[in-house]
Image: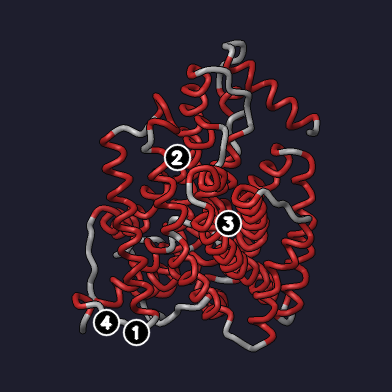
Amino acid sequence: MTNSSGRTRQAIADVLDGKRHGPKAALLFAGPAIVASVAYMDPGNYATNIQAGAGYGYTLLWVVLGANLIAMLFQALSARLGIVTGHNLAEHCRMHFPRPVVWIMWAVSEVAAMATDLAEFLGGAIGLALLFHMPLMAGMVITALVTYGLLLFDRGGFRPMEKVIAFFVGIIGLSYLAEVFIAPIHWGETAAGLVTPQLPDTMALTIAVGIIGATVMPHAIYLHSGLSQNRAEVRNDSDRRKLLTYSNREVIIALAGAGLVNMAMVMMAASAFHQGHSEVAEIETAYHTLTPLLGGAAAGFFLLSLIASGISSSVVGTMAGQMIMQGFIRRRVPVWLRRLVTMIPAFAVVAMGVDATRALVLSQVVLSIALPVPMVALLIFVSRRDIMGAFRLGLVWRVLAGAGAAVVLSLNFILLAQTFGIPVPFLAG
């Protein structure tokens, strides 16, 4: 472990012992939720948020808010599992489920990891291709090289990688802060959209399904438990309670930041496209339409955030894939090999001439199929007293988490039904 990670671990121990206090002490615990938050700002969110804002203005902001609250809860539960037990979600699946079930869960999770990486990898490549006017394939090669280089930071322990990801999260956040200042946002309609649940028509419901159904990301649920399990030496329940307090605070702050970015995407699209360009639904179209409407700066910030999102989320996706494999089957492959394997589908999609935005949508469908695996497993484990002991999830929170899971999984079913042409009665017409 590098000096940076070692110093952080020792400083965390000092905080747990009561030797350090204040805001600087709290910053020592920042990292896992920031890394996990990248999953909620990945390129797969861009097209959905743009479509929501362009087609319905500020009307669907309440959906983004609700989706973010569910995400907060499940990321907090994932961190809770890692902190209390010292094992991540994939390891618990291996330890507590029958072997055939474990192999099936691992296979489904690996497919989900590849689908996640497809969306993230394509997003970064699209951004580079548009910004530098290069072929998409060239953008993919550059994205591949950059992400592999960033993954090497993981050799230095947890702290260097957390700082790298935090840098990219900062770029995304600042880019959309700039967008909010550039675009003429209607703040009254924004406030109304956040607190007034409404779905004007069937297409609005379809977009809402896309927003919520793809919110809780399978790899983020796995990853957060692993990022939290070994950052500090836990000696007793008092340490666990302190770590959970800091973790919950970080989850709220980091996921609130991710939620604000998603809301800013919808607000920007509502401001720029809703009046006169409501048909905008693709990343490339949004970029080309932004320049004449809001100027080159708005389009530039849009691409900068997309590139930062694609690169950082691709790195995080590869980290999650490593953790999933190691947890389920106790195997670890070289990072270059995992990076290569997860890139192959993206290169194949582009080589076959498949529309990039269409590929992003299809990747979300694959994630919808895989999502029940970690989501249900997490609820099972945090509800078991023999695993969590005194930190077993309370009844009220179990009910809320169960309701959140029911909402997300039901909407994922609707998304899958629509994709495969299965009629859903209340969506008819």
Q: Do the residues labelled 4 and 1 touch (CB within 8 Å)?
A: yes
Instruction: State the residue position of label 3.
Output: 175
Mark 2 crowd level (few <14, some 14–19, many ≥20, 10 Å Cα): many
The residue beneath circle 1 is 421
Judged left or right of residue 76, residue 127 is right
Mark 1 and mark 3: Cα distance apart in space: 38 Å
x and y percent of residue 339 in the render? 73, 62
Q: Which mark is residue 423?
A: 4
Disc 3 to disc 4, C-alpha distance: 40 Å
The foreground one among 419 and 255 is 419
Q: Is residue 335 left or right of residue 247?
A: right
Q: Earlier in the sequence, mark 3 or mark 2?
A: 2
Q: Where is residue 222 in the image (x, y as percent from the top left)?
A: 54, 49
Q: Which of marks 2 and 1 is in front?
A: 1
What amino acid type should be assigned to the residue bearing mark 2?
Ala
Residue 136 in the image: above or below residue 46:
below
Give the residue furthest to the bottom: 353
N-terminal-most mark, 2 or 1: 2
